[in-house]
Structure formats: C-alpha cells, structure tokens
Image (cartoon, coloured by chain):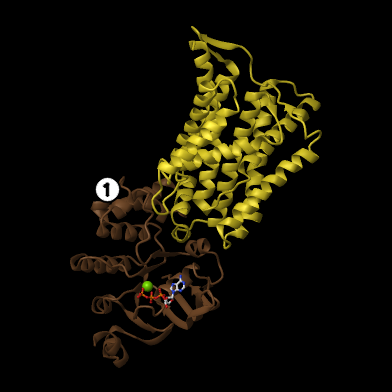
C-alpha cells in the first residue's frame, strides 16, 4: 500500500518568524492520522508546508520515500497529495462541476474524469442537481461537499483535510466523519486536522498534538485520551 | 444624414470596437492572472504591426507574391512573435516584480512601452516615418442598396469577430481556459489543484499579446498605414475599454471596446468639423461613466475574475 507520509524536523513560517520549529510526524499508509492542537498551533501551516504553499525552510517531507520538500506545488500534487483546505477555498465564480473538474486537473482523459465525477455525484447527490450552479452561491454545507468532492476527484495517495467540519451543523459534522472514514476504507491515507477531539479520535488510528509549532504528544486515540497534557488542553 | 454615410460610420465604429475589444481582452487577462496593469500592451500591438510589415517585406524579397500566403504569413509571424515577446516580458519583467507594489509594475511597463516605441523609431529602417501597410485583402465592395461595405472591411470584421469568439471559447470551454480562470480567482488553490502557475501566467501573457498583435495588424490593414506611435492611442483606448467594462471579465472588455468605439463614432458624427474632438468626447464620456460607476459597467466582486 502506498501513501506513507513522513515528515522530519520540518521548519516553516511566514516572513521572518518560524511557525513550525522542527516538526516530526508520519502518516501511515492506509490509515487516518489526526493532528490536534489549539488555535494558532501551526496545523494549517504544516498542511501548507507539505503542499509547498509555504515552502519549508528546513527538514524533509517524504511520500513513500520520495523527497518532496523544495518541489513546486504542482509537482507535489502530481506525486499524489490532495488537500481539502481550511475554509473550503472553492472557486466561487466557477460552477460546481468546474470546481470538481479542477480537482482532477492532472488526470488526463475525459472518460476517466466523467467516471470520477459520477462517483462524487453518487456520494453527494445534491451536487449532481447543482452541477451548473456557481460554487460561491451554494450554502455552507453544500460548499463543504464540493470541497470534499474536489479533494477526492484526483484520487490521491494521501488526502490532507484541514478542519472540514468548521461551520457545519452537528448532523452534517457526523456525516462528514462517516465520509472521511469511507474515503479511508477505500485505501486513501488521510491526515486529518480537526478541533472536534472526540469524534476525531473515534475514527483516527493514530494522533499527534501540536502546540506552538511543535509536536507535544503522540499516540493511539486511547493513549491520547489518557494523556494529561491533552486532557488539560482539550477536555478541561 | 444619408444612409450611405451612416453605414460608413457604423462599419467604422464596429471595426474600431473590435480592435479595442481585442486590446482590452489582453488587459483583462493580465489583470486577471497577476493583478497587474501592463501599460506596454498597446506598444506590443504596435511592434506586432511592424513585425507583420517586416514579414511582408521579407516575403516580397523572397519572391512570394501570392496575397493569401502573404496575408497568412503576416498574421502568423506577427501573432507568434508577439506571443513570445509577451511571455518574455512576463517572465523577466512582470513576474520578478510580483512582490513589489503594483505601482512599480505600472511604472516599469510604462517605461517598457516607451522603450519599444523608441526602439522602433530608431532601429526600424526609416522607423521615424509612417509606413504604408500593404493592401493584402481583396479590393471591391458589397452593395446593399445605399449601404456599401468594402470587401476588405468585411473580411477584417469577420476575422476580428472570429478571434474574439475563439478567445471566448478558449477561456470558457477548454481545460487551459479553466486553469486560467482558476488562477485568476485564487492562485494558491489553483496551485494546490496541480496547476503549474508560472506556466499558466506565461501562456496567458502570450495569449493576450498575440491577440494584441492581431489588433495591430488589423489596424494596419484598415488604415493602410502604421507608425511607431500607433500603440499609444490603441493601448489607451483598449485600457479605457477594459476599465469601463469593469476590468473583470472578457465580456466587460468586449462591451467596453464597443462602447468606447461607439462614443468615438458619436463624437465624430456630432462634430464632423474636427475629427480630433471625437477622442476628447470619448475620453470625457469615459471619465463621466467612471464617476457614476467607479467599478465599471460589470463590476467584479472581491477577487473573482476572467
Ligand atoms: N499568512 C500568514 N502570515 C503570517 N503569519 C501567519 C500566516 N498564517 C498563519 N500565521 C501565523 O502562524 C501561526 C500558526 O497559524 P496556523 O494557521 O498554522 O494555526 P492553526 O493551528 O491552523 O490554527 P487554527 O486551529 O486556528 O486553524 C499563527 O500564529 C498565525 O498567526
Ligand atoms: Mg488552521
């Protein structure tokens, strides 16, 4: 199985300040690895560094042994990484279907693209009805579906998901976690950034906790629930 | 006024509208992908016209006298050369300035425009004087009662409309166009879809500049004369058209092109005694439109473009 992501001593930041000061973690192939941490801990920065949007200043990022750090974003994506970014980041003036097509940008061939579109439409029938609507005019929940669907279109080896349940109703949050579990059961490695600690630990195989730009705890969900630092930070 | 004269004004207005729209599309594309205003665009169109003129001379010297082949050669060389020039300008002048304030790009491209103009004036053989652009299109005219349309004008109109339609299809119906629109709306997210951002920027500048070169050649064929300063008015008019249209999308650019040409034509009809006043009238009207609708006729919302 492929999709093993390993990060070592990663340093990254904006302007002069380093946000990540030596982060090491790995996402096992075929598993859901979660990343917890308070606001501003550097989770999104880590996702951006993996994608090359915030180019790392040090350390290494390997996917199945291949070094990715330093490559331009489009090559990193071509290596098999896709992202469901924080805040959805849809293209508001493009239609739902155009948004989904962009998720499949690197996959050549209209036939394959159509098949994947159908798969996403089967997962979210609502999107099939709304395929010609501009993404910016969709409701928040519908936009979440487009963003998830777009991340799936490329059938990546590993999917980086950054706070997918932000701004969703509790019912849809639950559905969201089910979908992530199903994506993973299909063989895709998942690195999940989340604030819903209980539901996240319920589906994750392994987890990391970040604080102030470094990893402060790691373990199985059971270990993390028992960890004092995590309890203090999250469970009050 | 009689129908014949009116039809002349109409044909002339549509022709100008097409040229402005072709130039304005470039401004809109550049602004879309990189948020820059590239002031040298009109001068690139001028260099395109001179490249076409030089190609004609070369073909003559090589003994190629078939006007169809000459016409195709002129258009192809001009468009291809300016596409390359546009990509080079983007690669070496505009992309490196991305981190700098937008005013710097504006200033640099303003100076580049001057450099292009002066280079043609100084280095093109006898470049300081206007050049007679060859009449490569068939003579003769089509008559519809009092309405006459010159055959060369008809061909130019058809070709201009075809180019606009092709650009429209390229932007809205192809994968490349989808990538250009994605980059224009959200560069970072476009990159995380696997789009090669730098490549799309170069392709977009090549496309806009090639279309601008087409407008330059069209201008030469229509007036049968080119000169080193022609890009200035063409560029400013195209820029005005793009701004009036909202600098947001290519529909705005097309609408703005025709609107600006319409204003000039109205100015010319209303003040036949002094043709120079038509520009004063048109630019005055643009100032008025901008005062009433500061964001242009089709305003862009947030960062949604092209
Ligand atoms: N574009 C940016 N420029 C400068 N600083 C930034 C930028 N983005 C984030 N930061 C800073 O980096 C730090 C980490 O931010 P990051 O977005 O990675 O946190 P996070 O863990 O994702 O938080 P949240 O849970 O709120 O999403 C914060 O202090 C933030 O202010
Ligand atoms: Mg975040």
Task: Chain A: give its colour.
Answer: brown
Residue B250 placement (x, y as % from top left)? 46, 40
The chain coloured yellow is B
Work out whether residue B21 can be spotted: no
User: Which residue is at 49% across, 25% downward?
Assistant: B266
Work out whether residue A75 can be spotted: yes
Residue at the disc numbered 1: A130
Q: Chain ID for label 1? A: A
Count of picture labels: 1
Q: In the drawing, does residue B125 fall left or right of residue B168? A: right
Residue B295 placement (x, y as % from top left)? 42, 46
Q: In the drawing, does residue B265 fall left or right of residue B55? A: left
Residue B279 placement (x, y as % from top left)? 56, 31
Residue furthest left as drawn: A171
Q: Quadrant of the C terminus of chain A?
A: bottom left
User: Which residue is at 55% across, 19% downward?
Assistant: B154
User: Which residue is at 68% across, 49% downward?
Assistant: B112
């Amino acid at each position: 199985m492929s999709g093993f992501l390993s990060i070592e001593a990663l340093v990254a930041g904006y302007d002069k300040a380093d946000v990540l000061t030596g982060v090491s973690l790995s996402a096992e192939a075929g598993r859901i690895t979660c990343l917890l941490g308070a606001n501003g801990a550097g989770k999104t920065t880590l996702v951006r560094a993996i994608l090359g949007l915030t180019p790392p200043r040090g350390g290494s990022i390997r996917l199945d042994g291949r070094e990715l750090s330093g490559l331009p974003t489009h090559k990193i994506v071509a290596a098999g990484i896709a992202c469901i970014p924080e805040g959805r980041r849809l293209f508001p003036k493009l239609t739902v279907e155009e948004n989904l097509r962009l998720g499949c940008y690197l996959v050549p061939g209209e036939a394959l693209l159509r098949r994947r579109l159908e798969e996403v439409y089967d997962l979210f029938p609502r999107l099939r009805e709304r395929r010609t609507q501009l993404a910016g005019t969709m409701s928040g929940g519908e936009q979440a579906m487009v963003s998830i669907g777009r991340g799936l279109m490329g059938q990546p080896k590993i999917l980086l998901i950054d706070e997918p349940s932000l701004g969703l109703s509790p019912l849809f949050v639950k559905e969201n976690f089910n979908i992530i579990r199903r994506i993973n059961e299909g063989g895709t490695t998942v690195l999940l950034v989340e604030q819903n600690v209980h539901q996240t630990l319920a589906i994750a195989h392994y987890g990391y906790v970040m604080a102030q730009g470094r990893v402060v705890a790691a373990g199985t969900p059971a270990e993390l629930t028992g960890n004092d630092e995590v309890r203090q930070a999250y469970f009050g | 006024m009689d129908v014949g004269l009116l039809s002349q004004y109409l044909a002339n207005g549509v022709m100008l509208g097409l040229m402005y729209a072709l130039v304005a599309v470039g401004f809109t594309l550049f602004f879309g992908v990189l948020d820059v205003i590239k002031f040298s665009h009109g001068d690139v169109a001028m260099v395109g016209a001179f490249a076409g003129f030089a190609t004609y001379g070369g073909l003559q010297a090589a003994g190629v006298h078939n006007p169809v082949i000459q016409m195709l050669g002129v258009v192809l060389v001009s468009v291809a050369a300016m596409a390359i020039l546009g990509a080079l300008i983007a690669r070496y002048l505009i992309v490196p300035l991305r981190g700098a304030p937008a005013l710097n790009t504006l200033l640099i491209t303003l100076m580049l425009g001057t450099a292009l103009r002066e280079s043609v004036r100084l280095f093109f053989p006898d470049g300081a004087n206007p050049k007679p652009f060859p009449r490569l299109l068939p003579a003769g005219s089509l008559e519809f009662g009092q309405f006459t349309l010159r055959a060369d004008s008809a061909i130019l109109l058809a070709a201009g409309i075809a180019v606009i339609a092709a650009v429209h299809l390229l932007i809205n119906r192809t994968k490349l166009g989808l990538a250009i629109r994605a980059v224009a709306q959200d560069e970072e997210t476009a990159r995380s879809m696997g789009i090669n951002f730098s490549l799309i920027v170069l392709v977009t500048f090549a496309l806009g500049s090639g279309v601008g070169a087409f407008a330059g050649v069209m201008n030469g064929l229509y007036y049968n004369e080119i000169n080193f300063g022609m890009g200035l008015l063409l560029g400013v008019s195209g820029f005005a058209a793009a701004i009036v249209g909202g600098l947001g999308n290519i529909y705005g650019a097309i609408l703005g092109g025709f609107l600006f040409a319409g204003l000039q034509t109205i100015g010319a009809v209303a003040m036949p005694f002094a043709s120079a006043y038509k520009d004063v009238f048109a630019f005055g009207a643009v100032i008025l439109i901008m005062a009433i609708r500061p964001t242009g006729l089709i305003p862009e919302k947030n960062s949604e473009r092209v």
